[in-house]
């Protein structure tokens, strides 16, 4: 029996690369939510690089395979052209007759084996292993929301974002038509019709400019017409639906919507002017107001993030000074004092320079990264830790025994502040993700108080929202958070400021520096002026660490005041 001969072919081995194993080790502790930490998103860069290498290897194998098949086909084409011209004459030669039988019995079967070889097995195996660590739908939605957050906070229009025009960037990146459509669809799925309109309009602009896309204009008009209807612009919804039907007359939903919109418009026309609803009075220019949300100081907060509305008047600036800080004449600081700079006069907020070296920062980040998890907040009613859309970052907690650098930093913060770290919380390290932020909040626990007190400006909203908040630190037995020490462990190219809406203050990150303030008055009452926020990171990767000092143990280090406002 004749043995089947196989054509020589370099097979692709089923293996997982060393690079893949390395980053799988890193990602084994990550639970999706990549968008909440740029530090974790960097791991995806290496994952994608490994996939590209695997894909290139697969292409090389496929090209080698096709080259052999093409060579075989060319050879057979020449041979059959000759044999088919004179079959009997060709086969009259006994060698030709033998080779014909052999080819059809052996060589064509070998070619079949070559064609059927699964050269994609290695690439598919690699992809399958990595897929379990890929970003999820939640990540894509979170990333889209992050871009929209930056759009709103820093007043960027979709065209600017689509062109990748961000301050301080060193890489060029643009959004395609399909990318913009994805943004609009994400907003639509969240019931956010305001951003749906902005992004679908950008899609139309790019389509009209001749950009190639897989999405059809009729799809865009379908989303856009319904979104403007939801915003109350019935006239424009009708006009867009007619445009849609002119492109796709068989579109059933559009046909139904057209009849529905026409009926509503007719009903509006029959009403007296005084009884017309908001929908009939909606703008005809296609410009819509951003919806009001849950945050009472939204405008003030976002203005400060842009560097606008800062109340650092010349009079206040004259009260701000720089000095060398020796602490309470601590020996270590007498030898090497820290440079101290006033950032605000009342409440007193100071910045210290050269608090952490680059080597210490890298070591802290190295220790923190494997422990990073989605940052949580305490529910004001239950006291339970939970994730929240207004805090987009990942954080971890480092103990003094984790590494000598942690113990050294704890002692340094104690020397600078004059407060004991024995009752302080662990060192928290945070890395902010895409558009990473922490909206206005207090670091201290709000206790119930008289509604007649502290009702100026946004403090009434504070009472309404937090008057029934539990004492969330009661179980610690160390009292409330008396002070905050915040280390900036990176520079941020744009955005990422720490702002105090009640004060009109904005503090910008500087690597190696730290800011410090007291959350409580000397009476033990909360200083509601310290309500602060971490602005969305526009460009860059923001790392911070902080130490929260508690009341217990500070009785003789920071004595109580005699009145409520001390």
Image (spheres, rainbow, N blue to C red):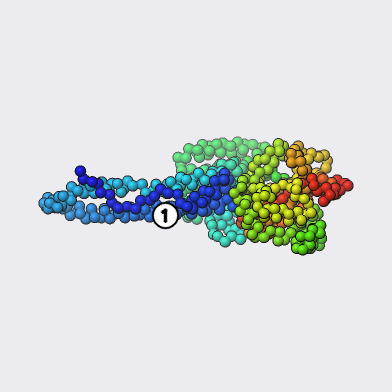
Front one among 264 and 445: 445
* Residue located farthest toward the right when viewing the structure as drawn: 562
Residue at 42% over, 49% down: 15
Q: In the depicted view, which residue is nearer to us: 549 or 199?
A: 549
Residue occupying the point 40% across, 52% down: 58
Tell me if I can see residue 14 in this picture.
yes
Count of numbered circles in the view? 1
Q: Under tag 1, what secondary structure?
A: helix
Residue 436, given in percent of the width and then of the height, sits at 63, 50
Place of residue 125 in the rendered image (x, y in percent of width and height, measured from the top left): 43, 46
**Is residue 183 among the parts visible in the rendering?**
no
Residue 321, above or below 181: below
Q: Is residue 165 above or below residue 376?
A: below
- Nearer to the camera, 376 or 139: 376
Q: Is residue 438 above or below residue 357?
A: above
Q: Is residue 285 left or right of residue 295?
A: left
Quadrant where the N terminus is found in the figure: top left
| Mark 1: few/some/many CA within 10 Å (<14, 14-19, 20+) | few
Residue 71, x across and y down, in percent: 28, 55
Displayed quadrant of residue 462 = top right
Query: Image check: 129 left or right of 412?
Result: left
- Residue 562 location (% of width, % of height): 88, 47
Q: Mark 1 highlights which residue? A: 56
Residue at 61% of width from left, 46% of height from top?
A: 373
Q: Residue at x 26, y 53 (%)?
A: 73
Q: Quadrant of residue 375?
A: top right
From the viewer's perspective, tell me whether residue 320 is left or right of residue 510. Answer: right
């Amino acid at each position: 029996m004749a043995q089947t001969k196989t054509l020589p072919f370099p097979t692709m081995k089923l293996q997982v690369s060393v690079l893949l194993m390395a980053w799988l080790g890193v990602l084994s502790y990550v639970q999706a939510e990549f968008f909440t930490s740029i530090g974790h998103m960097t791991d995806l860069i290496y994952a994608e690089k490994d996939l590209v290498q695997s894909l290139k290897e697969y292409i090389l194998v496929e090209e080698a395979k096709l080259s052999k098949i093409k060579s075989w086909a060319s050879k057979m084409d020449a041979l059959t052209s000759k044999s088919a011209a004179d079959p009997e004459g060709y086969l009259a030669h006994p060698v030709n007759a033998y080779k014909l039988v052999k080819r059809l019995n052996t060589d064509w079967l070998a070619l079949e084996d070559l064609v059927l070889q699964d050269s994609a097995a290695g690439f598919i195996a690699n992809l399958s292993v990595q897929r379990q660590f890929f970003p999820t739908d939640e990540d894509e939605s979170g990333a889209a929301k992050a871009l929209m957050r930056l759009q709103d906070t820093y007043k960027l229009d979709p065209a600017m974002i689509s062109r990748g025009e961000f301050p301080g960037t060193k890489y060029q990146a643009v959004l395609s038509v399909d990318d913009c459509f994805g943004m609009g669809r994400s907003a639509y799925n969240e019931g956010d019709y305001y951003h749906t309109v902005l992004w679908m309009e950008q899609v139309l602009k790019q389509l009209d400019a001749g950009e190639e896309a897989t999405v059809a204009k009729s799809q865009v008009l379908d989303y856009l017409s319904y979104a403007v209807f939801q915003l109350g612009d019935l006239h424009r919804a009708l006009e867009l639906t007619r445009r849609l039907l002119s492109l796709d007359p068989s579109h059933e939903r559009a046909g139904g919507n057209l009849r529905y919109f026409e009926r509503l418009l007719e009903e509006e026309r029959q009403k007296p002017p005084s009884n017309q609803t908001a929908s009939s009075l909606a703008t005809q220019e296609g410009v819509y107001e951003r919806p009001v949300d849950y945050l009472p100081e939204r405008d003030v907060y976002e203005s400060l993030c842009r560097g606008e509305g800062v109340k650092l008047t010349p009079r206040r600036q004259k009260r701000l000074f720089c000095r060398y800080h020796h602490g309470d004449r601590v020996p270590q600081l007498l030898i090497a004092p820290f440079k101290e700079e006033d950032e605000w006069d009342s409440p007193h907020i100071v910045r210290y320079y050269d608090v952490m070296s680059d080597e210490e920062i890298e070591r802290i980040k190295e220790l923190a990264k494997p422990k990073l998890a989605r940052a949580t907040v305490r529910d004001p009613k239950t006291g339970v830790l939970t994730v929240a859309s207004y805090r987009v970052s990942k954080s971890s907690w480092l103990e003094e025994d984790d590494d000598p650098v942690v113990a050294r930093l704890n002692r340094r913060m104690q020397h600078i502040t004059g407060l004991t770290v024995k009752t302080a919380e662990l060192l928290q390290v945070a890395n902010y993700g895409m558009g990473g932020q922490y909206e206005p909040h207090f670091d201290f626990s709000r206790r119930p108080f008289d509604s007649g007190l502290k009702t100026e400006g946004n403090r009434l909203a504070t009472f309404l929202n937090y008057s029934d908040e539990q004492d969330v630190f009661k179980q610690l037995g160390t009292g409330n958070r008396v002070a905050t020490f915040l280390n900036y462990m990176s520079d941020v190219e744009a955005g990422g400021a720490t702002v105090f809406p009640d004060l009109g203050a904005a503090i910008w990150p500087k690597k190696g520096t730290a800011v410090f303030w007291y959350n409580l008055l000397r009476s033990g009452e909360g200083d509601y002026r310290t309500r602060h926020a971490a602005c969305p990171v526009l460009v860059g990767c923001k790392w911070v660490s902080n130490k929260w000092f508690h009341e217990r143990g500070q009785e003789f280090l920071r004595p109580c005041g005699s009145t409520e406002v001390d």
